[in-house]
Image (cartoon, grey):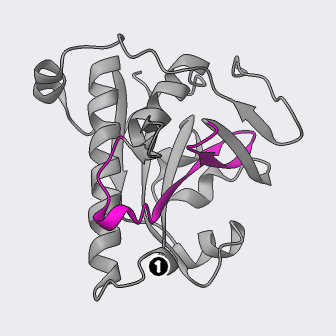
Amino acid sequence: MTPDFVFSQEGEIPLSAPDLKSGKPLMQALSERSSHREFNQQALSKEHLSGLLWAACGINRPESGKRTVPSARNWQDVQVYVFLKEGIYLYDEAGHKLVQVVAGDHRKVSGMQDFVEKAPVNLVYVSDYDRMKEAQDKSLYSGLSAGYISQNVYLYCASEGLNTVMRAMVDREAMHSLMNLKPSQHVVGAQTVGYRK
């Protein structure tokens, strides 16, 4: 099945505004939050992809550029890369769109488990250590930042009836090369998202 979004320019996918009234109440989402490793191969709808990424780390205060997740000293060191069948994309929070980094289906590279290759979406959390100027323990801060994003994704998925699982078993070196990351950028972890089987 092909996704129902369209490309505006070469390599860009514009996302619709997130529906801030969708989903289950917070306490119900918390009670239903869980990890699942089985996914329907159906592509996410444009509405779900938009809501998922905005929940992950979208801009919720346009006047300050601050996001839906906390960030020490507002470093915003973690960016979300999205592995889809069509390619690898960087989520541009300010423009609420996806910008293609690499064309082609590279979902298999986003993890070491069998299910990642067929799941519709794999999110990869990448921390840029250059953004954390005064940090003494950059790996600690990057882990915290990725954890905040992951939890937002978990709650969004629970609210919308999607499956998700956070993963640490990734080949960081292979992803670093494939994604053309800078030496200051570090893959922290990955999270798979899809419809339930």
Residue 36 visible? The answer is no
Quarter occupied by residue 196: top left
Horizontally, residue 110 falls left or right of residue 32, namely right
Name the quadrant containing residue 67: top left
Q: Looking at numbered disc 1 in the image, what kind of residue is underneath it? A: Tyr
Q: Position of 92 compared to 30: left or right?
A: right
Q: Which residue is mark 1?
A: 129
Residue 129: x and y in percent read 47, 79
At 19% from the left edge and 15% from the top edge, which residue is drawn? 25
Residue 197, x across and y down, in percent? 41, 21
Residue at 42% over, 82% down: 133
Residue 61 horizontal side relative to residue 148, left or right: right
Q: Above or below — where is 108 with respect to 30?
A: below
Q: In the image, is residue 145 part of the stretch drawn in magenta? A: no
Front residue of 29 and 168: 29
Q: Which range of residues does the magenta coloring cover?
A: 68-95
